[in-house]
Amino acid sequence: MKSRLYNYKTAIIASLILLIGVSGCNYFSNPLIDEESGESVKLLVVDLNFINTKLALHLQDIETNESIPSEEIEIFFIGDDADDVITFVGTKPEKFTTSSSFLEVGIDPNITVSKENPIELTVVAVGDNYISAPMALSYTTEGSKNVIIKLINIGTKSGSTGAYSEPYDIKFGGVLDSDQLDFKGSISTTSTGTAYEYLNLYRTLSAGTLICENISDPQIYADFGAYYVGLLSGQSLVPPAVPTKDAALGTPDMVYTSVLRTGVEKCDDGLTIKILESESNEGSGSFNYLITYSDETTDEGIVSGTFPIEVLIDNIYYPTSNPAVSVEVFEDAQYDMSAPVSLTSPCGAEANFTATIKSNLKTYKYIVRYTCPDSPIAIALSIRGEFRKTDTTGDWTAFEFVEGVTELQLEADEDYDFRINIDGESYEYSLPTDPDQLQQFLDDNQDAEFYTITSIDITETNTLVTIEAEVQLSGDICDIL
């Protein structure tokens, strides 16, 4: 790996700074002028956006679509570009793990991602009780990419219901539909990241040879076979490789059956989803999307960012006989969304949407600056976070700080939980929206060892609450930064 800009200790400090900053919020009314002396102040922007391409991995239970319960999950990256995967703060760890159903990683910023130089790798998530199907990722543009990874519970599920429902025969150890292939469930809602489609997941109970043969309808299926992941042997066959019809397997290996439908092609130019804010206000959001094809197959995912949001969906495979698609983007906690968009073809097309602030919400603008003892330098920060109303269990809504500034749409006088995720570990805290409570909240959350909140200014109008704070960091933290 090439030189890195941050190390692990700096990541912890950066997360601490964000917790301080969001708890009292962000940037400066006039960052280049000292408030007391009127003299110029040098501005240093500490910005984790030195990584041009980021992957936000969301781990979900395949049956419930909910986040995986608290369990340490290891994320494996496979392929020629796997060595270019780094942590959110620019390091290359021995392994990637998360206990929070979320992991954000980056691609080496020295790598330029383009059509001529795409990023291509395969990701597999493995825990004691959960495992995902391998998903091939391919990106031709830089930016933030959200990836939903569906995991199936292999610790408690076992049975024959739905087993061997493939349109071809499966022999293991010379036995058709062998009980040594333990059926774990359908994985048909999981994407391979290629034109191949997953069917079922099995786990081997003994070593043996897997043979797939006798396709039942070659008019519908152009190809078929199985992928596999060796949990102990390390020998695996994963997308984007072609699945095999004949493999010697060990135990316990995970076996993923698949088919390739006829008449399906990839859109080389992909599909762009673009979301504008109706009043052209500042802010950010996180939205689920659903692409429905003419044959009723679907793709789902997440688009997020700061308005205007524009995300290219690279891996689009469509039926050539009728390439028409419908694209729907769903509301989040802050915004209602405009109607679905119909397109005659997804290839190189743009689906445009408008986000409108929900009627019961008010805009909160958070601004902070950080200073160091006996120093004229002020520090701002850019980083991603999530929030949801306190005492609720719904989805978290993503937002972004850009050089220490963010605008959020929140219910007045309600408390909210905020969190960030650094290398798979979540840092969480609560924040009131009532200005009368905020000063007391800040007074109760000082930590002289690390920081002191030296000033706070709250300005409220009928439509906007602006909270500006100055946080003095300790000398030790400033030395690191």
Image (cartoon, rainbow, N blue to C red):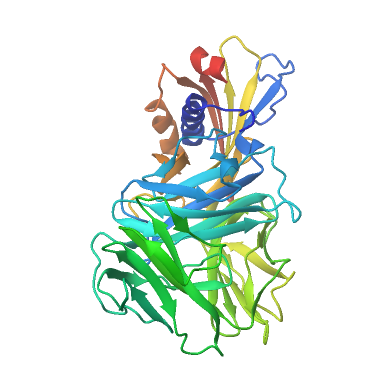
Quadrant in the picture for the C terminus: top right
> Where residue 75 sits: x, y (%)?
44, 48
Numbered circles on residues, count: 0
| Coordinates of residue 219 in the picture (x, y in percent) | 56, 90
Residue found at the very far top of the displayed protein: 374
Image side of residue 284 versus residue 209, left or right: right
Residue 465 position (above or below residue 240)? above
> 227 or 360, which is in the foreground?
227
Residue at 37% x, 77% y is 170
Residue 94 is at least partly visible in this image: yes
Q: Quadrant of residue 417?
A: top left
Residue drawn at x 71%, y 49% as measured from the top left: 113
What residue is at 60 percent from the left and 48 percent from the top? 80
Please name whichever residue, 4 or 337, is drawn nearer the observer in this view of the structure.
4
Q: Nearer the viewer, residue 416 or 422?
A: 422
Figure quadrant of residue 32? top right
Residue 286: name its quadrant: bottom right
Q: Is residue 222 above or below residue 156?
A: below
Q: Is residue 235 left or right of residue 219?
A: left
Residue furthest to the front? 174
Place of residue 255 in the rendered image (x, y in percent of width and height, measured from the top left):
39, 65
Judge from the rendering whether residue 58 lies leftward or rightward of residue 345; answer left or right.
left
- Percent coordinates x, y for residue 98 in the rendering: 40, 44
